[in-house]
Image: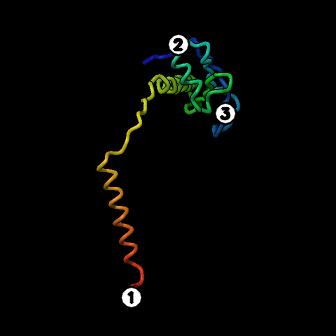
Amino acid sequence: MNLIDPNEVEFTAIRAQGPGGQNVNKVSNAIHLRFDIARSSLADAVKERLLTSRDQRISKEGVIILKAQQSRSQEQNRNDGLQRLQEIIAKAAILPKIRRATRPTRSSQRKRLDSKSTHGMRKELRGKVREN
């Protein structure tokens, strides 16, 4: 399920955040991944759905920016970032289901109105008894 070419992805090694002792300040294990949607070889429909999605990882310029820093290995972080990018694109590749408006059936409308009147009658009977 390879939807993207790894050559279209720009990888940058950066220092990871969080705990790690003295080593965290010396080693660049985290990966900053950038994928330009407009310049990619994706289908136009997929590009359009990606650009119109409200994902905060997609910048105004149409670039997907991911940061992978789960692992202590740069190669594992690189693979993790690529996998997450694949998931984003795979989700956009699925055509959204077209919603067709439907009308309630006549019997369901009748049932609803009957239950409303029954409920109203029940509440009316809770009141004080009046003598005429």
| Distance in Å between CA atoms under marks 3 and 1 | 85 Å
Is mark 2 in CB contact (under 8 Å) with mark 1?
A: no
Few, some or many C-alpha atoms within 10 Å of disc 3 (few <14, some 14-19, many ≥20)?
Answer: some
- The answer to whether 87 is drawn above or below residue 43 in the figure is below
Q: Name the residue: 36% across, 70% down.
A: 121
Identify the amino acid type marked 3. Val
| Whole-percent x, y for residue 120 in the image | 39, 68
Residue 35, horizontal then vertical, whole percent: 60, 19
Q: Secondary structure at mark 2?
A: loop
Asked where in the image residue 66 lies, by quadrant, the reply is top right
Q: Earlier in the sequence, mark 2 or mark 1?
A: 2
Q: Which quadrant of the figure contains the C terminus?
A: bottom left
Q: Nearer the viewer, residue 37 or 113?
A: 113
Q: Which residue is mark 2?
A: 5
Seen at 50% across and 25% down, the residue is 92
Expressed as whole percent of the image width and height from the top left, the position of residue 4 reads 51, 15
Q: Earlier in the sequence, mark 3 or mark 1?
A: 3
Mark 3 vs mark 1: in front: 1
Residue 61 as seen in the image, left or right of residue 8: right
